[in-house]
Amino acid sequence: MYTIDSVPGYNTVWRGMAAAEGLSAGPAFVYNPQSVVLSDRKIGSEQVKEEQKKVASAMRIVELETRKIAQLAGQENELGGKAAKDILDFHREILRDPQLIAEINERIRTDLIPGDRAIFLVFRGYIQKLEVSGSTFFKDRIPDIVDIRSRIISSLQQKEMIVQVQENAIIISREINPSEIILFARRKVKGIVAERGGLTSHATIIAKSMGIPFVLEVEGITKGIKPGEWVVVDGYNGVVITQPARAFLKQIQVRSDAIDREKADEQKLYAEPGMTACGNKIPIRVNLELEAEIDRVMRYQPEGVGLLRTEAYFLDQSQDDTAPENGSFAGSDQKRFLERAAQLAGHDYLTVRLYDVGGDKLPSYADREENPALGWRGIRILLEKRSLLRAQLQLILEAVNSYPCKLRILIPLVTRTEDVLEVRAELDRLLKDFPAQKPELGIMVEVPSTAIMADAFAGIVDFMSIGTNDLTQYTLAADRGNPRVAEYFDSAHPAIWRLINQVVRVCRGHNIRVSVCGELAANPQAACILTGLGVSSLSMAGPYIPQVKKKLRAHTLALMEKQALSILNVETTKDAKKIMMQF
């Protein structure tokens, strides 16, 4: 680690959110793209066709640029190229969307306005729909839409898209779009800082894929830094340091070199199984949410898929109020995702969670609720919209039927045994058409009542998976997305450890497996405690797998069990963290 000494006039600390890991220093390039200036003139009816042709030409140019950028992304590195390419292919699909083109042409024809203003107004309509959707997933797509809109208008107005950025610069901007990150990566920038953005946005995904340290939500930094001034970006802790002192820069270089050596050592672990120093195996599996992630995580060689989230493929559909009743949803993308995940799992487990919609991921037909976290979500929606449940179960069984993986189906937000029995009955009816399939049915342990009633659930399920993010939220009454109560949302709280222990003991007594798939599993120190408690397997985002493997293989199960026993007796989160840090 490094220390930030107080030096008058130096080492100014800015705090934000860590979006992509990495530690680097370099000269600041304040990126402030010119705001879109729209034409305010009216056109005559005789000019409509000519204006429409200009729009079509601009969209073709941007589509070609996007294809070229995708090719550049593929040349960057094996980890990031495919992920970036998939995202840019999404951009190309939008650019080729006939409905979008038709709406722009219609706006030009009926309002008699130039193409740039028609483009802006049509895209604004899409953006406004995303803003009021109530879904974090949808809101995080907004920068992509803004990016495409700006590039079409710039092309139409014959402006240059490529920004001249020197190598090894640190980009400082109000907001970064996905395609810009690709171009910045091509120029070998060493870090990115943004005043706004989302942790699940495409820009963040690409930054992670490209290995570019990225810190966002750093309020006011574009006005607080001068071009060319040196800056340090810490993508591990979400910290930015401007005007770094010379001695501090030397510290950063030493720490950066040490991280590079650690990563080189971790790569040797990729092909090794998860186990303790004494040889006790603890499978390390991967969490997946999008198909674009699969190529990125293959290099970590996970021992199966511990959590396959499917709601993105449900929320990404355009649905009306009747769609869930007849089971209608575009399943081709989801089926391909399931098939590729089954290939990744090999002969190991593929754990598919049923649609976990609701809360901040509202389906189009859901009413607004006073407290969505405690409302109509998860299995409650699926049992009420029964045809949707059946359609997804059918799709899952069909997609993995020809693969050797061991299928597990996971029920989200379970609070009562009756719901599990109803899902079991629906699954059993469908399995008559899949005689070779013998999937396991399990539940997410996300609320205190489920942990307390674990014994009752253990008699009717084949496995359990503990989601520590929601379990922490519901146990500690702290909204996981509310910064005002962030200090209360801490998965190291003693109550969380005791609930986990209770679930593990019950599962052991019924001879069923229990995994942890929340953020706690990705914490190397916490992973040691979880192993000591007797958790059967751990599941996390791909980049965390090497760190967790390394930590587990450095300690014996006896030590982990000893520390796990100690953590069950503490009364404060501070004391629990002290025990974790023993590792």
Image (cartoon, grey):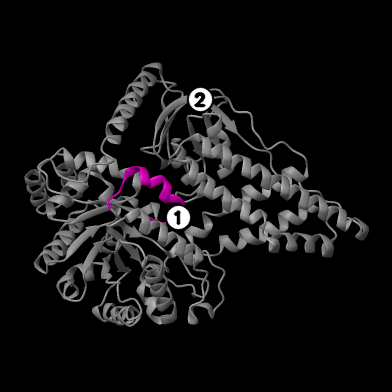
Residue 360 seen anywhere in this rendered image of the structure: no
Q: Where is residue 545 in the image (x, y as percent from the top left)?
A: 29, 44
Q: Does the magenta stretch include residue 289?
A: yes
Q: Give the range drawn in magenta.
A: 288-303
Q: In this view, does 63 lie above or below 135?
A: above
Which kind of residue does numbered mark 1 sit on? Glu
Q: For this view, does 165 lie left or right of residue 104? A: left
Name the mark on residue 98. Answer: none
Q: Does the magenta stretch include residue 158?
A: no
Q: Nearer the viewer, residue 374 or 325?
A: 325
Q: Where is residue 16 in the image (x, y as percent from the top left)?
A: 43, 41
Q: For this view, does 246 lie left or right of residue 35? A: left
Question: Residue 123's quadrant in the figure?
Answer: bottom right
Q: Where is residue 275 in the image (x, y as percent from the top left)?
A: 17, 45
Nearer to us: label 2 or label 1: 1
Which kind of residue does numbered mark 2 sit on? Asn
Q: Where is residue 188 in the image (x, y as percent from the top left)?
A: 52, 29
- Please tell me whether mark 2 sits on a helix, a strand or a loop: loop
- Residues under labels 2 and 1: Cα distance? 31 Å
Quarter of the picture containing the C terminus is top left
Question: Residue 209's quadrant in the figure?
Answer: top left
Q: Which of 156 and 272 is in front in this view?
A: 272
